[in-house]
Amino acid sequence: MKKIVLLMALLLLVSCYDADRNCKDFKIGKFKFEYEVNGVKKTTFFERNDSIEIETFEGKTDTASIRWVNDCEYILQKLHPKNMAEEKAIGMKILTTSKNSYTFEFGMVGSDAKQRGTVTKLTN
């Protein structure tokens, strides 16, 4: 009986834990996203206001519209897609935040495949 009570108390504590997310702090500003592709470090810089995101990657700049679903989720849609893959919207969800960075999950809208990454805020 003690084990059941202990297990229930542990489950209650775990279920009450909610990561602190200050997503509003990341709606606007300049950001950096670093990731690795086939062992090579890649960096994307982007600037975001409430409705537009301008991204620069390997010397190329692209613009996407932003539609906020709530304070921590938004949909990116490229304004000038160059192929069918770029026409697909990307769902973004901020999972956790810290003082100057956030961890997020992203994937094509309608797809179950998701990836994760961390973005660093450079300036407001």
Image (cartoon, grey):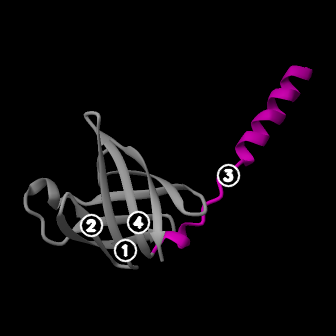
**Magenta-colored segment: predominant secondary structure:** helix
Separation of residues labelled 1 and 2 (CA atoms): 9 Å
Separation of residues labelled 4 and 2 (CA atoms): 9 Å
Q: Position of residue 21 (x, y in %)?
A: 60, 61
SS for dot 1: strand
The range drawn in magenta is 1-27
Pointer 2 residue: 55
Check the image and report above or below for 46 versus 93: below
Q: Quadrant of the rendered structure where residue 12 is?
A: top right
Task: Give the left or right position of residue 20, taking residue 41 as reference.
Answer: right
Give neighbour class at mark 1: few <14, some 14-19, many 20+ (Cα, 10 Å).
many
- Which badge, 3 or 4, comes first in the chain's sequence? 3
58 or 70: nearer the viewer: 58
Q: Position of residue 106 (x, y in %)?
A: 37, 51
- Residue at left 73%, top 40%? 14
* Label ID, residue 18: 3
Pointer 4 residue: 31
